[in-house]
Image (cartoon, helix red, strand yellow):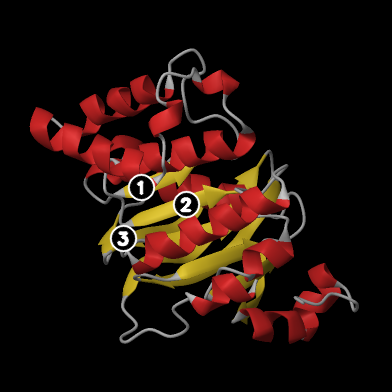
Amino acid sequence: MALIKKFRIKSFKKEEQILKLEKISMFYNKRQILNNLSLNINKQEILGMLGPNGVGKSTIFHIITGLKDPSFGKVLINDVDCTNIPIYERATKFKIGYVPQYGGFFQDLTLIENLKLVGEIHVKDKHLRNEKIDKVISQFEFDPLLKIKAKFLSGGQKKKLVISMTLINDPSILLLDEPFAALDILTIKMLQEIIVNLQSLEKITVVVCDHQARDLLSCVDRAIVLSDGKIIASGSPDEIIKDTNARTAYFGDEFKIN
């Protein structure tokens, strides 16, 4: 944990909003998932989302990407109302990248074939496309894995592959849905360092949701806790675990980061 925090950006030179959810409500079969939720996310921030199952974390990701439309409210990216803009345009024009908890790659294609396929979709110039693919191969140390089919990669290698596939499109905002799930300690540490480097080196805004609270809080600048479709607490990792509402609804009295 100390290794991760050493490289974290703990404050912003200038807070500048990149993404805003404005009074979002969402219903599934008359059941309310999100209740008049508002959230501002700053450029080059690492934001963590925490909360129990079914509280709406993945739904927020789906609304941001355009996979689902909110029942009420607006999604603004760089102050542009994107609520009715389709998925593809959000990914290309507004540079939204999404790493789902499961999948995100083609099982029967090799690692390099997955990268080339995404590159052909997003980058028309062949020279530039090859440059971007070479960059992520070097960045993620993929050389020994290039000809291995994706289905035979380890859990951590698959997660790295999906992240690298999103980076080919140069995302401004990257959404990571439960990246630490079912991974060993060393792989989690590797992913934490990747997340911090995306912020510090690639200047990407990163939003992470996960049930592994300690792992998430080790690499974020700010965290929010969701309960009953609302944000009930927001703050730095140290602030969030001391918040009475967060401890009551999610952490419990015994939770500590260290």
Residue pictured at 67% horizontal, 84% vertical? 238
Q: Position of residue 105 (x, y in %)?
A: 47, 26
Residue closer to the observer: 70 or 2: 2
In primary-sequence order, the first of circles 3 and 2 is 2
**Residue 196 seen in the current view:** yes
* Residue projecting furthest to the top: 108
Q: Is residue 253 left or right of residue 177?
A: right
On the question of residue 205 being in view, the answer is no
Instruction: Please indicate whether residue 121 sits to the left or right of residue 143 in the image.
Output: left
Q: Nearer the viewer, mark 3 or mark 2?
A: 3
Above-or-below relation of 46 to 244: above
* Front one among 225 and 31: 225
Q: Marks 3/2: CA distance? A: 15 Å
Query: Which secondary structure, mark 1?
Result: helix
Q: How busy is the neighbourhood of tag 3: few (under 14 within 10 Å), some, or many (20 plus)?
A: some
Q: Secondary structure at mark 3?
A: loop
Amino acid found under the numbered disc labelled 2 = Leu
Residue 139 has which mark? 1
Q: Residue at x 57, y 27 (%)?
A: 153
Which callout, 1 or 2, points to the residue nearer the camera? Answer: 1
Give residue 156's quadrant in the image. Answer: top right
In the rendered image, which residue does mark 3 sit on? 202
- Give the residue at mark 2: 175
Residue type (three-letter) at the residue carrying disc 3: Glu
* Labelled disc at residue 47: none
Q: Is residue 140 above or below residue 217?
A: above
Image location of residue 116, percent across then percent down: 28, 24
Which of the pair 212/190 is nearer the observer?
190
Instruction: Identify the mark nearer the N-term, 1 or 3.
Output: 1
Q: Residue at x 56, y 76 (%)?
A: 5
